[in-house]
Each structure stands twice: as C-alpha cells, then as structure tokens.
Amino acid sequence: MKKVILIDGNNILFRSYYATAYSGNTMKNSKGFPTNALYGLINMIQKIIKEENPEYIMVALDKGKTFRHDEYKDYKAGRIEMPDELKQQFPVAKKLLNAMGITYYEVENYEADDIIGTFAKKIDDPNDDFIGTIISSDKDLLQLISDKVTVKLLKSKDYIMMDKTNFVDTYGLEPVRMIDLKGLMGDASDNIPGVRGIGEKTALKLLHEYN
C-alpha cells in the first residue's frame, strides 16, 4: 500500500500563525516580512515526512467564498477577518510548497475540506493501492475515516490518531455519522446553528437511541 498524506493547509497556516501571534511573538525576516505561519508549515511538513514516510503528500487550500456561502448567507459569518500579516504569507506558502516539490490544490468555489474529501474517496477505492492520513485539527474531517483513511487530529501540543476503531470507541457511531452529529448540534465555528438546546452529549444520546 502506498501512503498518501492529505494536509489541511489553511488549518496548518492559521494554527502556526496564531501559535506565536497570541504571545505577541510574530516572527519576521530582515525586511520585516512576517514568517511565523510559513515557519510552522515547513516544520509541520518536515515532521510529517520524518514520522509518516509517505509516498505522496498533498496540501489543500481554500480559495475565497464557496457554494456554501450561496446556500447559506450566514455561513462562517462573525469570524474575525484574516489578519494582513497572515494573508501576506499565503502566496509565499505556495511558492515554498512548489520549491519543496509538494503539490497543493485550490479550487474555485470549494474549500480545502472538499478537496481532501475528494482525495479521501479516491483512496477508498478498493481497486487502488493507497492508504491515507488526513492532517488537521478540524473535526469535520472525521467523517472521512474509513478502512483506508485515518485522521491525525491535531491538538494544541500533540495529536490524536483517529482510525475507524478509535472513532467508534469514542462516539459509538460509524464515522460518516459525524454528519448527523454536526447537523443536530450545529457548528459554532462555521456559524451553523443546529437544533436549539442540543449539544454534543444530547445529540449522541439521540443518535444512539434512534439511530
């Protein structure tokens, strides 16, 4: 089996930027250009290569508004606008990925999540000789876990490796049911309300009881 690593690029760049920005330690080069997100991205990729030894790596990036904004005008409303210091680092991140020989994808009207989902489904094809690991801190991507796809769920100082067994042990559901779970409880980070008064605990209880 050939190992494929699918990286949520926006997630890594945001995490890297805020890890230092919150402490007021924004890294800059000799010309005053911010580099903290770039530094974090490169460190993460080097760590992934060392730990996972994959045959293939793909980095997925967002590209502006998506079809979800057309469907629901308040999608991701209320989020703080991306700081200029972070915004400036995205074009350089793409140049760095090219220089490292790592493919990145961004598709008009779609999110990085959609790109990762497309690759994950390709890996799931029983006729293809691939296994995959998704790297992100976004729990939405847990729905893509399968017999051939795992998720390295990043935490503030470490990670949790989630495969199908771990997911079922944690939630008592098949991974694809993450869709139902989020539908009931909503997702504050994306400004999706869910059902009034239902959080994760109640949503899980309902899904366990009524399937």
Image (spheres, grey):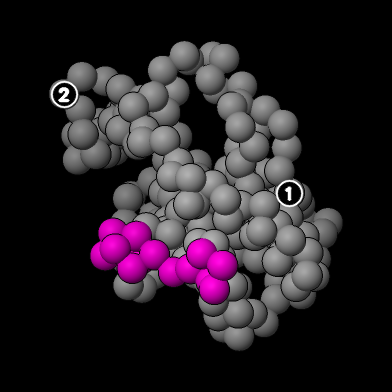
Q: Quadrant of residue 22?
A: bottom left
Label 2: which residue? 197
View extreme (bottom): residue: 50
Of the numbered discs in the image, which one, if any, rests on residue 168? Answer: none
Residue 134: image location, x then y, percent: 57, 59
> In this view of the protein, which residue sits in the foreground, 175 or 193?
193
**175 displayed left or right of 114:** left
The amino acid type, in three-letter code, at marker 1 is: Tyr
Which residue appears at 71% of the width and 71% of the height?
Answer: 3
Label 1: which residue? 105
Question: Visible in this render: residue 152?
Answer: no
Q: Nearer the viewer, mark 2 or mark 1?
A: 1
Q: Is residue 89 above or below residue 117?
A: below
Q: Looking at the image, how many numbered discs can be counted on the residues? A: 2
Label 1 element class: strand
Q: Quadrant of the N terminus?
A: bottom right
* Between discs 2 and 1, the one toward the N terminus: 1
Residue 33: image location, x then y, percent: 54, 62
Question: Does residue 82 belong to the magenta stretch?
Answer: no
**46 displayed left or right of 20:** right
Label 2 element class: loop
View extreme (right): residue: 127
Q: Which segment is the magenta one?
A: 20-32
Which residue appears at 53% of the width and 71% of the height?
Answer: 29
Q: Quadrant of the C terminus?
A: top left
Pointer 2 with pointer 1, Cβ within 8 A: no
